[in-house]
Image (cartoon, rainbow, N blue to C red):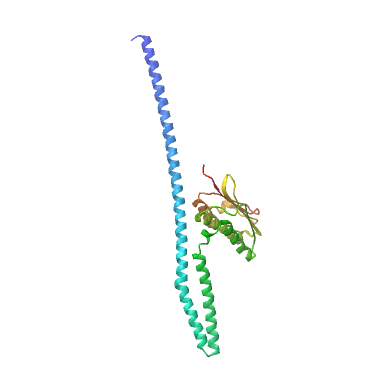
Amino acid sequence: MGETELFLTIILFNIFFVFFIVAVMVYIKKYKQRKVEYLSEIQIKNEIHQRELLATQLEIQQSTMQQIGRELHDNIGQKLTLVSLYTQQLLYENRVPEVSERIDQVSQIINQSLQDLRSLSKTLTDDNISQKEITTLIQEEVDNINALKKCDIYFEHDTENLDLDFVHKNVLLRITQEFIQNSIKHSQCKSIFIKLNTSEENLWELNIKDDGVGFDTSKTLSNGIGLTNMKNRAKIIGAEFSFMSEANSGTYLNISFKNQP
């Protein structure tokens, strides 16, 4: 073999070697890319599964509450009604004033307990969330709190009919209730502002803000049960959750549900 042929052989070998190295690098890059895509797909599937699991748990919880409410009404409620009738009969038949007074007191306690039980049963069995719009549900909650005169709550919305299923309405209502209760208990707020808006970018967006003392979120984020509950509820429906608070600047919450691309 001449020098020219040897030189060409070396050049061809180097070219093939370079192609081999490039091919290996391309393969490794694509392998890593496919691995990232696979892990991302697994993560997305896990998140979807987790949301479906939480939503199922929520529906089971609601069904259980309804069953408890029916049992209270049909079983314990009937027994209390019977006891109330017995006390009324005793009150009618008794002729001793002192005893009649005691029987009347017992009768009043039983009747009040029966009213409380009926109210609780109605709350548990009434499919209030499914039958009403989310704006109505939030407004009712606002009216109930304002009636206590502990804090002024203002609710604004740009739509009357927001097409939401039971799970979405339940999540928004419970988060709103959680925020209001936490603000009244801990923030010393005078006012709470709630806005529920719709837009082209988002299906809906819920903003809640109070004018309370605020707090250091770095000391609460990992331990706050109320905040954790709100974040977990937002995950159920795949909504974006944002929470901010600063000392003497109040607390702000934003939940948005965006159109999926």
- Image-based side of 127 in relation to 13, left or right: right
The answer to whether residue 134 is above or below residue 80 is above
Quarter of the figure with the N terminus = top left
Front-most of residues 38 and 21: 38
Residue 57 at x, y = what percent?
A: 45, 57
Q: Is residue 122 left or right of residue 17?
A: right
Q: Residue furthest left?
A: 1
At 46% from the left and 60% from the top, the residue drawn is 61
Residue 209 location, x and y as percent?
62, 54
Q: Is residue 9 visible?
A: yes
Q: Percent x, y for residue 179?
A: 58, 57
Reply above or below: 47 against 20.
Answer: below
Residue 223: tell me if it is visible: no
Q: Residue at x 44, y 42 (%)?
A: 41
Q: How many marks?
A: 0
Residue in the foreground of this view, choosing between 211 and 45? 45
Q: In the image, residue 98 lies at what x, y percent?
A: 55, 88
Residue placed most toward the observer, 185 or 115? 115
At 45% across and 71% down in the image, what residue appears?
74
Residue at (49%, 81%) from the top-left corner? Answer: 85
